[in-house]
Amino acid sequence: MGLAREIQTRVQTVRKEMALEYTDRINVTVQGSERVARVVARDAERLKAEVLADEVTTGTAPDGAAEHVLDVEGERVVLVVVRA
């Protein structure tokens, strides 16, 4: 649960950096190791609810989207957050 919480915290930080309103809906793409993908898939519904996301996916980010490369618990994680 620690990795999932840390990813949630990082998504919230990106939301703030984007100056999104609390009620703005987002779509999140997460890229990382198999462990990261497994954790995101397992906790996708909770993550969606916590960060107000319409979609939380793993894999390739949409073309032209800003990537946020992070180190989360020793894992390289690439977050892409776009307004829905």
Image (tube, helix red, strand yellow):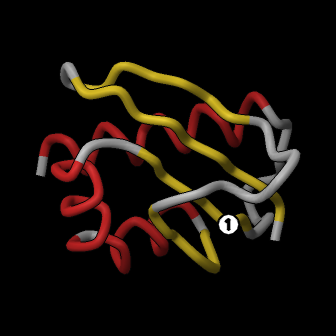
In the current view of this chain or complex, which residue is farthest to the left? 1
Residue 66 falls left or right of residue 71: right
Give the x, y percent position of residue 65: 81, 46
Q: Which amino acid type corresponds to the residue marked 1 in the rendered image?
A: Asn
Nearer-the-camera pick, 71 or 59: 59
* In this view, 80 is above or below 9: below
- Note whether 68 is above or below 34 in the view shown: above
Q: Relative to 22, say whether 55 is above or below.
A: below
Which residue does the numbered mark 1 point to in the structure image?
A: 27
Residue at 59% across, 57% down: 60
x then y, percent, for residue 13: 59, 32
Label 1 residue SS? strand
* Residue 24 placement (x, y as % from top left): 80, 64
Which residue does the image show at 48% across and 72% down from the upper left? 48
Does residue 70 appear to the left or right of 27 in the view shown? Answer: left
Nearest the viewer among 10 and 23 is 10
